[in-house]
Amino acid sequence: MILLANAGARPLRAAARAVGPYLWGGKYFSSGKEPVENSPATPMLQHLVYKIKSTGPITVAEYMKEVLTNPVKGYYVHRDMLGEKGDFITSPEISQIFGEVFSQLGSVLKKCDISIHLVEVSQKLSEIQALTLTEEKVPLERDAGSPVYMKGVTKSGIPISWYRDLQDVPKEHSFYVAHEFFDVLPVHKFQKTPQGWREVLIDIDPQVSDKLRFVLAPCATPAEAFIQHDETRDHVEVCPEAGVIIQELSQRIALTGGAALIADYGHDGTKTDTFRGFCGHKLHDVLIAPGTADLTADVDFSYLRRMAQGTVASLGPIKQQTFLKNMGIDVRLKVLLDKSTEPSLRQQLLQGYDMLMNPKKMGERFNFFALLPHQRLHGRNHEINANQSKPSSSPVAGFSELTWQ
């Protein structure tokens, strides 16, 4: 099993230097008019100012990469951002039920010779993962210069390894799980103008030397090639790195079998400006105090489907509410409630269930998307075009309605 954690990216650079100021009414963006005292000069801000002064305005993708995964000052590299004391909480932390509904996978694999491979660039998070997962009596093997920078054994005796790049993970029959992975990959942002598509860049505010602002590139930039020719939205976000990873996963699954399950905030090619920041569990201006807040953008699942290019079949996206119901979350909740006699625990279970399933909370904001071999769905001789994503002819856990036999 391979779990994808927050990974670095290699975004395209914008060629243009001369830019014009740009303000828009997006829900999550900086207006460029916040008072300077609200933007402390963090080490990351100082680094970015120096970088922009040296090379010119940078793309939003390059900004995200620097802020999140810079080896020295990156937000993900040295911080513990999870949990109540961090900046956000993920589904497994909200309720034990989320993890338990996936126990069916464990029951399928328990008779197999398996190993766990984690793709994780954050040294801090990898240490937390090792502390939680591995057997204390078996010392970890560490080699910072190796593609496999840490090895160990889980508390249940399963070999576990850590990598920084998916390319370094052995190409074998694997089940890939990417939970809130794609939403932190760097995106390029584009605005439609009378002159055509123009990329949104980040520059230094000429009025305040240590403040950043959004600007528009004066001409076409390389990443424009990723915009669909028939695009009807006036503002789009594209993530080339996500496409590269999907193609890699698709080729691996087609070659060696297995499947990939992707769970993330996202849409099916309908949303526009979703780039936002989180700090202390609250929305945070993406240009304020870079390096102190998480940056994220909703995943465009229609783009992921296109990038699979028909190499494998795709299912979804479907809402978390539907997926977990299909996985039997209601049944699991009833079992836990029946076994619990402590009122506080029962309340905790119900609150967690509500957070996961309520359409106004995570129930319809979080989505599930899968990649799997064509023969798993339609038989070995079935052909499918790159943009087709029809319901399977044979049941797939989570994507087919739960039935009892």
Image: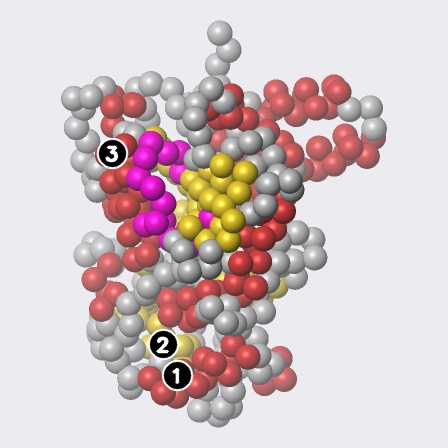
Q: Give the range drawn in magenta.
A: 162-176
* Quadrant including the N terminus: top left
Residue 170 painted magenta: yes
User: Is residue 370 at all visible to an observer of this figure?
Assistant: no
| Residue 58 disc label | 2
Residue 348 in view: yes
Residue 234 position within the rendered picture, expressed as x and y whole percent measured from the top left:
32, 62
**Residue 44 on image: x %, y %:** 52, 77
Res. 7 image quadrant: bottom left
* Residue of label 3: 254
Q: Do the residues labelled 3 and 1 touch (CB within 8 Å)?
A: no
Spatial separation of the CA atoms under disc 3 and disc 1: 42 Å
Find residue 55 and report its image quarter. Answer: bottom left
Task: Tell me which residue sits at (57%, 64%) in the image.
Answer: 78
Number of marks:
3
**Residue at position x 59%, y 45% in the image:** 139
What's the residue type where badge 3 is placed? Ala
Q: Which of marks 3 and 2 is nearer the N terminus?
A: 2
Q: In the figure, is residue 77 to the left or right of 187? A: right
Q: In this view, does 183 lie above or below 262?
A: below
- Neighbours of disc 2 within 10 Å: few (<14), some (14-19), many (20+): many
Label drawn at residue 52? 1
- Amino acid beneath label 2: Ile
Residue 76, percent from left and from top? 52, 61
Task: Tell me which numbered mark, 2 or 1, is placed earlier along the sequence.
Answer: 1
Is label 3 or label 2 in front?
3
Is residue 381 left or right of 244 when viewed as pictured?
left
Marks 2 and 1: CB-CB under 8 Å?
Answer: yes
